[in-house]
Image: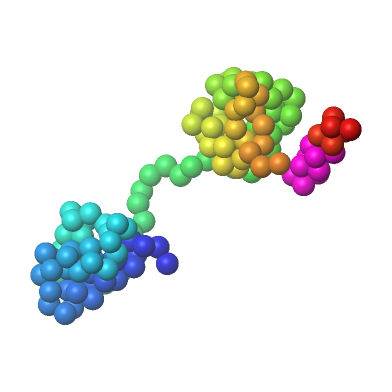
Amino acid sequence: MDGSLEQRYAIKFCVRLGKNATETFQMLQEAFKDDCISRSQSGRWYKAFKEGREKVVDERRSGRPTTARTDENVTRVRQVLRSNRRLSIQQIADTLNLSTFAVHGIVTEDLQMRKVCAKLVPKVLTDEQKESRVSRCKDCWV
């Protein structure tokens, strides 16, 4: 369970016990230590539960849904990188007509790549790549 969600349940429980906002926050600090939500956040949730709110989960918010990090765009970025790994995030974004923020997210989170010596490479080597490196090193020492 999410830590802040757990704390909201605790706040709701304290409201039902008749604790005030200060006591509630002190109890949260004691229970959750460094992972405790802020005093102002605690106060907002305390007030909401005091006024009769029942749900502890966030309500849906309006806003524009993310559309750039789709499977199709991940595939497109992967194909561009296969053709030339020396492209910058900006160049990839310009090529695919996507935002640099979206391309950066796709490259770092979806494809798990990072920039090394002006070349985008995978963060984690496959077992085959590791074995290949070991065998090359052994060949050099023989």
Residue depicted at x 71% and y 22%: 84
Please name whichever residue, 33 or 42, is drawn nearer the observer in this view of the structure.
33
Picture coordinates of residue 77, whole percent (x, y): 65, 32
- Quadrant for residue 122, please give it: top right
Picture coordinates of residue 91, whole percent (x, y): 59, 19
Q: How many marks?
A: 0
| Residue 49 visible in the displayed image | no
**117 lies above or below 3:** above
First to last magenta residue range: 126-135
Quadrant including the N terminus: bottom left
Residue depicted at x 69% and y 34%: 78
Residue depicted at x 81% and y 34%: 137
| Residue 137 visible in the displayed image | yes
What kind of secondary structure does the magenta stretch mostly adopt? helix
- Quadrant for residue 54, please give it: bottom left
**Magenta stretch: residue 106 in it?**
no
**123 lies above or below 99:** below
**Magenta stretch: residue 129 in it?**
yes
Q: Is residue 130 left or right of residue 2?
A: right
Quadrant including the C terminus: top right
Question: Seen from this angle, which residue lies furthest bottom?
Answer: 17
Please name whichever residue, 64 or 40, is drawn nearer the observer in this view of the structure.
40
Picture coordinates of residue 140, whole percent (x, y): 85, 30
